[in-house]
Image (cartoon, rainbow, N blue to C red):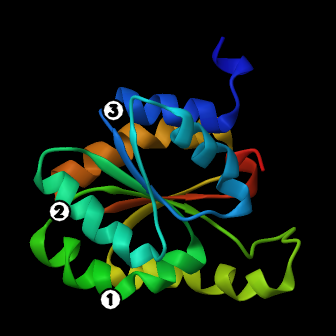
Amino acid sequence: MTSQLSPSQRMLSELKSQGFRLFCTLPDIWTTEIIELLRADPEVIHVPLAREEEGIGICVGAQMAGAPSAMIIQNAGFFNCIGTIASLPLRYDVPFLLLISYRGLWGEDYPFHVHKGIYTEPLLKALGLTYKLVTSPDEAVAAIPDAWRLAQFSQRPVAIVLTREALGA
């Protein structure tokens, strides 16, 4: 049955099995399906964002209240969050998951995304965030429990960086 589910359905199912019920999102064309699934799911709280930085505060607050949270954004949105990540979850040791669509790699359809591919991993490293680059739906689903365990153990956000193929986009 799992093979009949889309990559987004499989990822959401795994996130929910790990206890995630609060999701902050800002759309990217690659994450449209998972965002639509979140909007339609009565078992989760979906918080659409106007700016990605808002999601950092919401995820930190939810986690501090005992609700595991995840943020689903594009790498450009991650760039917008760097100061907020450094001053809130990294300073106060608050774990949550970042699921980041990795625009700007080989096969990118739009030239304005290319620079994003250049800076994503160096910026994750500069913040000292542990991340895993995943390139298939199976790898994406398998990364979720490991990433969440590491986030909880380290008391820091952990990122899963998703290629187009991992998202099935």
**Where does label 2 land, which residue?**
94
Mark 2 is on which residue type? Val
> Where's the N terminus, which quadrant?
top right
| Image spot of residue 27 (x, y percent) | 62, 63
Q: Position of residue 110 (x, y in %)?
A: 86, 78
As measured in the structure, the alpha-carbon distance from the residue carrying label 3 to the one carrying label 2 is 17 Å
Q: Residue at x 39, y 36 (%)?
A: 44
Q: Residue at x 58, y 79 (%)?
A: 76
The residue sitting at the top extreme is: 1
Sequence-earlier tag: 3 or 1? 3
Q: Which mark is residue 83?
A: 1
What amino acid is found at the position of numbered circle 3 in the picture?
Gln
Number of numbered discs on residues:
3
Residue that mark 3 sits on = 18
Q: Residues within 10 Å of mark 2 (few under 14, many from 20)?
A: many
Q: Secondary structure at mark 1?
A: helix
> Where residue 124 appears, x then y in whole percent?
44, 77
Q: Residues within 10 Å of mark 1 (few under 14, many from 20)?
A: few
- Residue 134 in sight from this viewpoint: yes
Separation of residues labelled 2 and 1 (CA atoms): 15 Å
Q: Amino acid at mark 1?
A: Gly
